Image: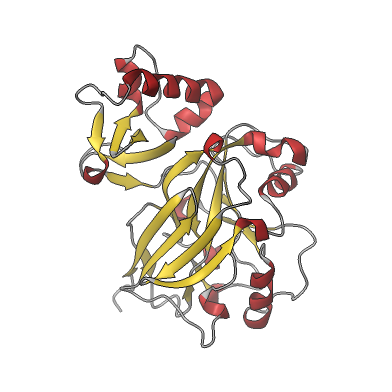
Amino acid sequence: MKLVTYRASVEAPARLGVIDGDLVVDVERLGAAQGETLPATMLGLIDCGRPGLETLAACLQAANARHKPGTATALANVKLLAPIPRPRKNIFGIGLNYVEHVAESAATLDTSKDLPKEPVVFSKPPTTVIGPGDGIEHNGKMTRQLDWEVELAVIIGTTARRIAKADALAHVFGYSVMIDVSARDNRRAGQWIFSKGMDSYAPFGPWIVTADEVPDPQRLDIWLTVNGVEKQRSNTRHMLFKVDDLIADISTGITLEPGDIIATGTPAGVGAGRTPQEWLKPGDVVAGHVQGIGRLRNPVVDATPDA
């Protein structure tokens, strides 16, 4: 299933939906039409666990695309938000997780040329998250080196604490697309959270594809374009640390909880690694793609405060 958070109008509250063809079906209202109780938010559904997804699937099957009035809206007529508009805690970011990106970062960003022996973990605050079509803020007083990184996002479905790698994927609720925006000239003493943690620096969406639809998260093409020109292309099989490695590693010391998000790292082709270097500017449009998941498209907007 493809699960979205959406607004039916500018004034309407955010609601949980499921994609059915070219329709967004409201999950709570679909359940009510079938005599079932289903949540109105993505985090609510994640908290329901497998029984919630099974109930939703049964309701969709029973409706058989003949949705009662008020339960479905054309996808073209809704505003998609980030699937989890406000994560409960910081996003877990993974740095230097593709071999060629390690090399380009060492050449241009003063990171080590050696492959990491364990995952490099940083974080992005909940306030970084924006949805499809929302503006990536370019504050010209803060940065002249705004960069792009397309990533596979993993959404945790059940609590994971000190788990084995073999059990890790059983804790995944689903997958999405994230663009890890970075102000390269705002790294501080080797720390990345300010560079990567400013408002709007985590475009996320357009939906969550449930884990049952992605049998192998390590066989997905991943690419990014700026203004329609391809800048990054790889496959998730080239990750140094696979999704199950990352879940197992983080859970050794930090409990992963339902709704937590892991951004799994980016391949080569970022602006800092290009010759000459390239940086995002207001008016640019960034689009991140993951095979079988979807496309996430965001414009860069001028957010420079007046003098």
**In the current view of this chain or complex, which residue is farthest to the right?**
117
Identify which residue is drawn at 52% across, 53% down: 125
Q: Looking at the picture, how far across and down is residue 193, in whole percent?
A: 58, 62
- In this image, 191 relative to 84: left or right? right
> Across the whole image, how many numbered discs are drawn on residues?
0
The reply to whether residue 163 is visible in this rendering is no
Q: Position of residue 31 (x, y in %)?
A: 35, 19
Does 231 sit above or below residue 206?
below
User: Does residue 289 appear anywhere in the picture?
Assistant: yes
Residue 151 vertical position relative to residue 38 in the rendered view, above or below? below
Front residue (pair 230, 175): 230
Q: Name the outermost residue toward the top.
A: 35
Q: Position of residue 243 (x, y in %)?
A: 66, 48
Quadrant housing residue 270 = bottom right
Q: Nearer the viewer, residue 143 or 150?
A: 150
Q: Quadrant of the N terminus?
A: top left
Q: Quadrant of residue 281?
A: bottom left
Q: Residue at x 45, y 29 (%)?
A: 44
Question: Which residue of the protein is positioned furthest toward the bottom in this rendering?
Answer: 276
Image spot of residue 43 (x, y percent): 47, 33
Residue positioned 26% across, 24% down in the render: 67
Is residue 139 toward the left or the right of residue 238 in the image? Answer: left
The quadrant in which the C terminus is found is bottom left
**Up/down of 237 relative to 189, above or below:** above
